[in-house]
Image (cartoon, coloured by chain):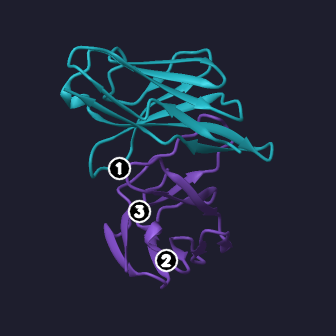
Chain colours: A purple, B cyan
């Protein structure tokens, strides 16, 4: 799996959009960009994933650059409950049950009142 | 759907004893489950991959005789920390592979188990 680079920490004001960047310059053509988050002392939670098109769901939007070397996770209206560590992971989308998810250090997002 | 549970959520044990952690897929069958360990202020580290009915595959540096993994059914995997020591105190998280839309597998994570060895 390709490696990712994320800022170690970010702050965001409550109610504003949180934009979390991720660099993945060595991503392969068949690798997807996945985002998970982990709220303190809980298991990771899946947020969104994409291959090359921008994606949106009820939690967030994912913007992937045209060259696929970087992406941005957008939480449109951050709340205090969005304070968590956000992990950007690139991986081949599982064609087998034993495809692993390997976590990097992630970005610790603090939403400030 | 695709809910994974762990039991117990917290456990305290004395040094030298063994402790078992259960990981269950509640509403789906999981051919493969994964075990992670997380120390304070660190990321999740994959320990092993367990396939139903076969021996687990351990990541480099993980002692297979210390961390015993059993995946006896499609809905249950257990991690037993044998002869636990204070340095084994950690947050243990499991995940289970679930095939979505009949073609691709995604991982769903349990809530974690906090182990404290005194």
Q: Cα distance, mark 3 to mark 1?
A: 12 Å
Q: Is residue A42 above or below residue A17?
A: above
Q: Chain of mark 3?
A: A
Res. A78 mark: 2
Find the distance from the CA under tag 2 to the CA under tag 1: 23 Å
Q: Position of residue B37 (x, y in %)?
A: 37, 37
Measure how far apart labels 3 and 2 are at the Cα level.
Answer: 11 Å
Q: Which residue is mark 3?
A: A84
Q: Is residue A111 visible?
A: yes
Reading the image, the residue beneath label 1 is: B43
Crowdedness of circle 1 by 10 Å Cα count: few (<14), some, many (20+)? Answer: some
Q: Residue at x 57, y 77 (%)?
A: A65
What's the residue at 46%, 67% (across, down)?
Answer: A81
**Residue A42 placed where, x, y %?**
44, 48
Q: Earlier in the sequence, mark 3 or mark 2?
A: 2
* Observer able to see residue A23: no
Residue B34 position in % (x across, y down): 51, 33
Residue positioned 65% across, 64% down in the render: A51
In depth, the one of A84 and A30 nearer the eye is A84
| Occupied quadrant, residue B83 | top left
């Amino acid at each position: 799996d390709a490696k990712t680079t994320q800022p170690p920490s970010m702050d965001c004001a409550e109610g504003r959009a949180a934009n979390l960047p991720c660099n993945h310059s060595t991503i392969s053509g068949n690798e997807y960009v996945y985002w998970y988050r982990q709220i303190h002392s809980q298991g990771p939670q899946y947020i969104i994933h994409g291959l090359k098109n921008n994606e949106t769901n009820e939690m967030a939007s994912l913007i992937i650059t045209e060259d696929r070397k970087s992406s941005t996770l957008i939480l449109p209206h951050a709340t205090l409950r969005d304070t968590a560590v956000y992990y950007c992971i690139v991986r081949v989308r599982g064609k087998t049950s034993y495809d692993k998810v390997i976590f990097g250090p992630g970005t610790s997002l603090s939403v400030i009142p | 759907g695709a809910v994974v549970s762990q039991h117990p959520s917290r456990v305290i044990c004395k040094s030298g004893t063994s402790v078992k952690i259960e990981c269950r897929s509640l509403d789906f069958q999981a051919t493969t489950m994964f075990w992670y360990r997380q120390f304070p202020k660190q990321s999740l580290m994959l320990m092993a991959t367990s396939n139903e009915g076969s021996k687990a595959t351990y990541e480099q540096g993980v002692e297979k005789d210390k961390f015993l993994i059993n995946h006896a059914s499609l809905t249950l995997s257990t991690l037993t920390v044998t002869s636990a020591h204070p340095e084994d105190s950690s947050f243990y998280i499991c995940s289970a592979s679930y095939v979505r839309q009949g073609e691709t597998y995604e991982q769903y994570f349990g809530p974690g188990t906090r182990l404290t060895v005194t």
